[in-house]
Image (cartoon, rainbow, N blue to C red):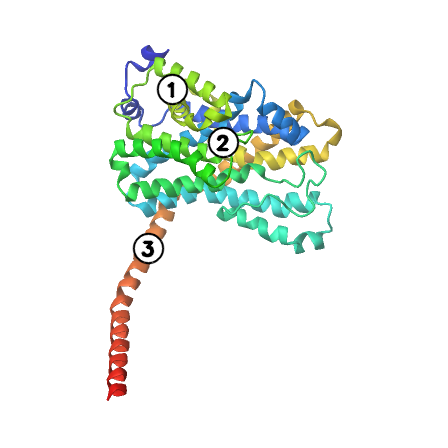
Amino acid sequence: MGAAMFGGETIGERLTATRGRTTGFDYLRAGLSISVIAFHSVLTSYGEAYTRMVWNGWWRPFIAVILPAFFALSGFLVSASLVRSKTIQEFLTLRVVRLVPALFFEVTISALILGPLLTVFTLRDYFASPLFRAYWLNIVGYIHFQLPGLFLDNPDPNMVNRQLWTIPVELKCYLAITGISLIGFSRKKWRMLALLALCIVAFPVIDFARGQDPFGMDNVPAKVMIESFLAGVTIFLFKDDLPLSRGLFLLSAALTFVCLSNRYASYIASIPTAYLTVYLGLTNTPRTLVSRIGDYSYGLYIYGYAIQQAYAFLFPGFRVWWANIAASLTVAFVCAALSWHLLEKPVLENRKHAVAAVERAASFIGRRLKALMPAQRRAAHRKQMQRASADTDGGS
């Protein structure tokens, strides 16, 4: 495979040749989403103590790579979306269109169907609880994990959607790349590389300065996800310089394994993880059912944990990881398929209308502000003249 497969191409040449449509990203998204459910089968079946044992075992790097790879993939692909977008408003609208509708639907199902069916509270107390009202804030990225009376005695008690903790991190990444674009770093690739290097050094230093231990977590810190996103952005900017090399791929895989094996080296894992992810994403393997049916990865991710918690609640005598995976993945696949075909795909097919609506709203607001500015200046001038007149009268 390797050099023969890619013919010595650069990343940019491969993107141009395939128009950015390689099956590798399809398989990668699906595989990473399934991996999240597989790992969460340990937490939802046995609890946090057992999960910490898994994190500290020999398999740590295979678990730790999942989310950084997700974020590196996102950084690379979102950069391409930013380049294609005519305005920042269009770019941000496309991000909202991709994330929010499916998230809104999942939150609604959890709060209005799953919760009332499985809560140990009365329906009156359930709907009157502040937890129920706060749960809807998940839609705007203000994450709340609990619903009233749900999963109280599960191995991971009270948690409905633990995996949603990554949503605010992803939103921060979108704001970061927007800021990077506005200040021009997206047109200065060496500055972007310097910014990435600065983040790798500064993030743990900032935690130390705040009295926090950046290496004290069993899992991978959220800041490593942000670094991985920025590494994906950086690789996109260097796409015309970086070769798709089997040697670089193997080196990146080895460095990723070493860095993620030790929590003290996790902050420097972002660059090799990003290259590893992009290399795999740009492979153009034969299409199968997985790459033809649609992008179920987001649905699998957002529905998976609630389904796993429901399984642990309904079958307390059969809380074993493999049964959890088999049952939960089956139900999550159905939910993801419905989400994709009934909601996500139709919304994406009509995204131009959303972009046009936002552009019209932004234009209207801009015109109103311009119309108000002269009136505001005149009013301010009149007030200034009135104060000056009052001062003159008072002095005389």
Question: In this figure, which residue is indicated by the disc labeled 2?
Answer: 297
Task: Report helix, strand or loop for mark 3.
Answer: helix
Give coordinates of residue 1: x percent, y percent: 37, 11
* Residue 89 visible here: yes
Query: Which sits earlier in the primary sequence, circle 3 or circle 2?
Result: 2
Give coordinates of residue 57: x percent, y percent: 58, 20
Which quadrant would residue 161 be assigned to in this image?
top right
Which quadrant would residue 46 be assigned to in this image?
top right
Amino acid type of disc 3? Ala
56 sits to left or right of 183:
right
User: Crowding near pointer 1: few (<14 within 10 Å), some, many (20+)?
Assistant: some
Give whichever of 358, 209 is nearer the camera: 209
User: Crowding near pointer 2: few (<14 within 10 Å), some, many (20+)?
Assistant: many
Q: CA distance from mark 1 to mark 2?
A: 18 Å
11 vs 1: above or below: below
Q: CA distance from mark 3 to mark 2?
A: 32 Å
What residue lies at 40% left-to-right and 14% top-to-bottom? 250
Find residue 283 and name its label.
Answer: 1
Find residue 340 and name its label.
Answer: none
Give coordinates of residue 147: x percent, y percent: 64, 46
Question: In this figure, which residue is indicated by the disc labeled 3?
Answer: 362
Give whichever of 79, 86 is nearer the camera: 79
* Residue 76 visible here: no
Amino acid type of disc 2? Ser
385 vs 255: above or below: below
Q: CA distance from mark 3 to mark 1?
A: 40 Å
What residue lies at 30% left-to-right and 63% top-to-bottom? 369
276 sits to left or right of 305:
left
Query: Which sits earlier in the primary sequence, circle 3 or circle 1?
Result: 1
Give whichever of 96, 169 is nearer the camera: 169
Rendered-image quadrant of the C terminus: bottom left
